[in-house]
Structures are given as structure tokens and as C-alpha cells.
């Protein structure tokens, strides 16, 4: 019986994507979390200083989360010499799903924690809810990023181009 039809040559990898999808997904999710956290916290602090109500403050934070999340891909692409239009297209394709999932989960957690929204920006309850929201969002976003990467989508599109 010949069993060699399923054997790879010595040293060959068996169905392992290169680079490792798990490592790339962790990096992509960490990148997304960092941009989202910076944007949200900055947006919330600016909104608090300007006296915004909680809902407009959260929307400002979400908007800035997208700005910072995208910038972590866009700026390095530009620095690599890529044209603005191509860098923008690649950034939107690479990061949009990750940021949408991260922001949806993170803000949903805050909305579901009893009293967090009413507590306001000066409350430990609000900021603790935000921290828990980011942690839960990371856990939910990671498999989404890995799934995208395994299909040549998401952060895989920008990997190695910066």
C-alpha cells in the first residue's frame, strides 16, 4: 500500500499559513485595541472638558477610535512610500471590520453595565466598565481578525507593506 500521497517533502509545512495567522491576528487585535482605546479615551476626555452629555461624548470617542485605529495602519503605509489613495484603500480594507467589531462590543458592554452610562465620566464605574469592555472586545475581535487573515483579508492585506 502506498501512503505517500499525503506526505509532504521533508521540512515542508502542513497547511500552516505564513506568517503565522495566530501571531498576526494577535498583533492586529492589539493594534486595533490600542487605536480604539486612545481614540475613545481622548474623545471622552475632550467631550468631558467641553461639557458634552454622555451620548455625544461616546460618539466623539467612537469617531476618534476610528481615526486613531486607521492612523496606525495609514501613516506607516504612507511612510513606506505608498500613494495616499492606495494607502487609504488598503487601510480601510485592512482595519474596518476589526474596528467595527471592537467598538461595537466595547460600547455594548458599557451600555449593558447597570448604571455605567448614568455614572458619567467622573465615575470609577464608567471607567471600569470601559476597561472591561475593551477586554471583552479584544477577546471577541481576535477570532474575527484571525478568520479574516486566514482568508487573506483584514490585516493580512497590510502586513509587510509598511
Image: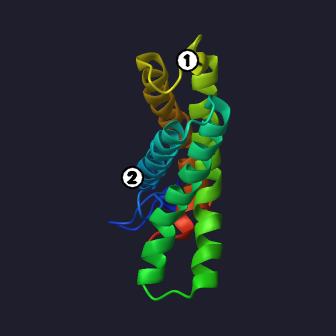
Q: Which mark is first along the chain, 1 or 2?
A: 2
Using the numbered discs, state the Cα–Cα distance from disc 2 to disc 1 in whole angstroms: 34 Å
Which residue, given by chain and number where applicable, does mark 2 sit on?
A: 23
Other residues around mark 2 within 10 Å, as few (<14) / some (14–19) / many (≥20):
few
Colour scheme in use: rainbow
Q: Nearest the camera: 122 or 141?
A: 122
| Closer to the eye: label 2 or 1 | 1
Q: Residue 59 sits in which quadrant?
A: top right
Residue at 65 percent across and 52 percent down: it is 97
Other residues around mark 1 within 10 Å, as few (<14) / some (14–19) / many (≥20):
many
Please tell me whether residue 66 is drawn above or below residue 142 in the rendered image: below
Identify the secondary structure beneath mark 2: helix
> Where is residue 144 drawn, in percent x and y?
59, 45
Residue at 60 percent across and 32 percent down: it is 107
> Where is residue 76 drawn, in percent x and y?
42, 74
Residue at 63 percent across and 42 percent down: it is 101
> Where is residue 18 drawn, in percent x and y?
44, 65
Identify the secondary structure beneath mark 1: helix
Q: Nearest the camera: 25 or 36?
A: 36
Tag on residue 6? none
Residue at 49 percent across and 22 percent down: it is 126
Which residue, given by chain and number where applicable, does mark 1 sit on?
A: 116
Please tell me whether residue 23 is drawn above or below residue 123 in the rendered image: below
* Residue 82 shows up from this direction: yes
Q: Residue furthest left?
A: 11
Count of numbered labels shown in the rendering: 2
> Where is residue 162 drawn, in percent x and y?
42, 76
Q: Nearest the camera: 25 or 4?
A: 25
* Residue 161 shows up from this direction: no
Amino acid at each position: 500500500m502506498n501512503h505517500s500521497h499525503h506526505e509532504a517533502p521533508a521540512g515542508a509545512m502542513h497547511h500552516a499559513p505564513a506568517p503565522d495567522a495566530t501571531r498576526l491576528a494577535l498583533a492586529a487585535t492589539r493594534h486595533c485595541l490600542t487605536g480604539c482605546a486612545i481614540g475613545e479615551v481622548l474623545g471622552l476626555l475632550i467631550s468631558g472638558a467641553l461639557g458634552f452629555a454622555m451620548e455625544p461624548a461616546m460618539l466623539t470617542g467612537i469617531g476618534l477610535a476610528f481615526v486613531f485605529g486607521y492612523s496606525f495602519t495609514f501613516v506607516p503605509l504612507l511612510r513606506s512610500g505608498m500613494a495616499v489613495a492606495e494607502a487609504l484603500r488598503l487601510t480601510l480594507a485592512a482595519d474596518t471590520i476589526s474596528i467595527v467589531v471592537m467598538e461595537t462590543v466595547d460600547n455594548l458592554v458599557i451600555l449593558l453595565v447597570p448604571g455605567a452610562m448614568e455614572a458619567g465620566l467622573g465615575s470609577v464605574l464608567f471607567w471600569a466598565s470601559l476597561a472591561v469592555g475593551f477586554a471583552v472586545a479584544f477577546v471577541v475581535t481576535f477570532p474575527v481578525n484571525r478568520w479574516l487573515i486566514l482568508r487573506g483579508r483584514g490585516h493580512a492585506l497590510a502586513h509587510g507593506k509598511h
